[in-house]
Each structure stands twice: as structure tokens, then as C-alpha cells.
Image: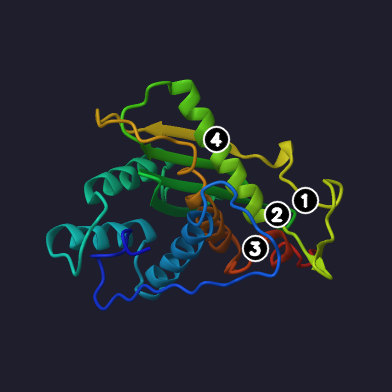
Amino acid sequence: RENNFPSGAVENLLIDSVEHRSPVTTAPWRAPITNFLGYAEQAFLDEVAEAAKKDPVQFRLELLEKAKTSPAGPVRYDVDRMIGVIKLAAENSGWGTKKDVSQGFSVYYSHASYVAQVADVVMKAGKPVVKKIHAAIDCGEVINLSGARQQVMGGIVDGMGHAMFGELSFRDGIAEQNNFHKYRLIRMKEIPDVDTHFVNNGIDPTGLGEPALPPTGGAVANAIYKATGKRLKKQPFIKEEPFTAKTV
């Protein structure tokens, strides 16, 4: 999006959009538009970091430092607040220090709040399993801490569930999944632990109904890549390798 990172952080940036008129009636789900933009952007940024031989967290911090000190264009987001959640998530997740755990990073500014996430993935029976997601959130002053944590957890579970499992297929313009026995939802046993940390900066509160969802798909996809070497570019992830690969 033109008002979001990495605007101002990279040279020769072109952001365009194409409207696709679907023959199937659609409606918004949680975090409209940013729900898929966050995943696409943050998964791609990890590919760029790898090509540049940079740590994914450090790569983002370097880009943000450029946006702060010598911007390549307009910067319409708060660089310091984004840096703050990145550092907080990396610190609280033990980024890069864990053994037998593959970690994926993601950060996104949406719906007036900043959220960074680290997903912890382990391999079980040859398949990647998301064990924990660490979240750092700057939504201004938190009025109700318990309610805020629940909003973050709900957004993360929703984001992970849709990225991993959610799919509708259509035949003759009608959805083939007509009830929950055919439409795959995330299950209780698949929900990871969620660790939340809030930035206490005294800024007027901005809300948490949407912003925790967009970074989740990217964090999970990046962690699964670290664990398996397989880039996930299609949703739902469960239909892609390594989930479909046969194990010995």
C-alpha cells in the first residue's frame, strides 16, 4: 500500500493495483484488504532478505533506518513505532537463539496500529507444527489489558486458521463447501500458544479489532520455510508441500 512500509525505504518503488471483478459474490472478512496484503508483502520481504544475505529482522530495521534518515519518498507511517514493535518481538521471542525451533518474522502497520510477530515452528513426524506465536503490539494506550490480549489472540488464530486451512471451491457458481463438515477450520489442538506484549507509550488508543491478523500468515509462512526449505506462495498452506509430502 502506498502509505505503508516499505514506502520511503527503497528506491524506485512502484505500487499499483488492479481491480478484479469476481463472478462470485464476496464480502469482507476480518482486516479487509490487509489480510492478504500483509502475507504477500512479508513473505516476499523474507525472500529479498535471503537474496541480500541479511537476517530478516535486521534487514527490516535497516530499511526503516533509511526511511527515517534519508527517505526515498513520502513516509506516512511512524517509523519509530514500527522499529519499536520489531525490536520488542525479536527480544521477547529469543529471535535466532533457539535450538530445534524454526522462527519466522513479520511486521505490519494496518488499521492505525503496529504489530510484529514471530512464529515458532517445530517438526513432528516430518511435518511443520506452529507451536507458539510471539506478538508485539503498539496500539497506543491499552485501556483493557485482558480485552486487548483476547483481541490479539483472536486475530492471530483467525489469521493462522485462514492461511493454513480456509478454502472455498466453486462449481457452477455454487460453493462446494456448504457446511463446516466440508469447510476446514483451525481446531483447538492446532492453536499455538500466543505471547503478547504491548508498547506503553501513552499515545491515544487506536484499536485492536483488525491489526493482529495481517502479520500472521507471513510469520507462519516464513517459519515453515526455515523449517522445511519450502516457500509457501498459495493458501491454504495445508494443501502445499511440505504438508502433502509423504513421510517415511
Looking at the rendered structure, the kind of residue marked 2 is Gly
Most extreme residue toward the bottom is: 12
Q: CA distance from mark 4 to mark 2?
A: 18 Å
Looking at the rendered structure, the kind of residue marked 3 is Gln
Q: CA distance from mark 3 to mark 4?
A: 21 Å
Most extreme residue toward the left is: 69
Q: Which residue: 28% across, 31% down?
A: 204
SS state under label 2: loop
Q: Around disc 2, counting alpha carbons within 10 Å, would you say few (fewer than 14), some (14 to 19), or many (20 or more)?
A: some
Residue 29 vs residue 248: left or right? left
Which residue corresponds to mark 2? Answer: 166
Give whichever of discs 4 and 1 has the lower sequence position.
4
SS state under label 3: loop
Which residue corresponds to mark 1? Answer: 184
In the displayed structure, would residue 225 be above or below residue 51? above
Which residue corresponds to mark 3? Answer: 235
Q: Are marks 3 and 2 in contact (CB under 8 Å)?
A: yes
Q: Where residue 209 sits: x, y (%)?
A: 49, 37
Q: CA distance from mark 2 to mark 1?
A: 6 Å
Residue 229 vs residue 84: left or right? right
Looking at the rendered structure, the kind of residue marked 1 is Arg
In the rendered image, the quadrant that contains the C terminus is bottom right
Give whichever of discs 3 and 2 has the lower sequence position.
2
Give whichever of discs 4 and 2 has the lower sequence position.
4
Q: Which residue: 65% across, 52% down?
A: 162
Which residue corresponds to mark 4? Answer: 153
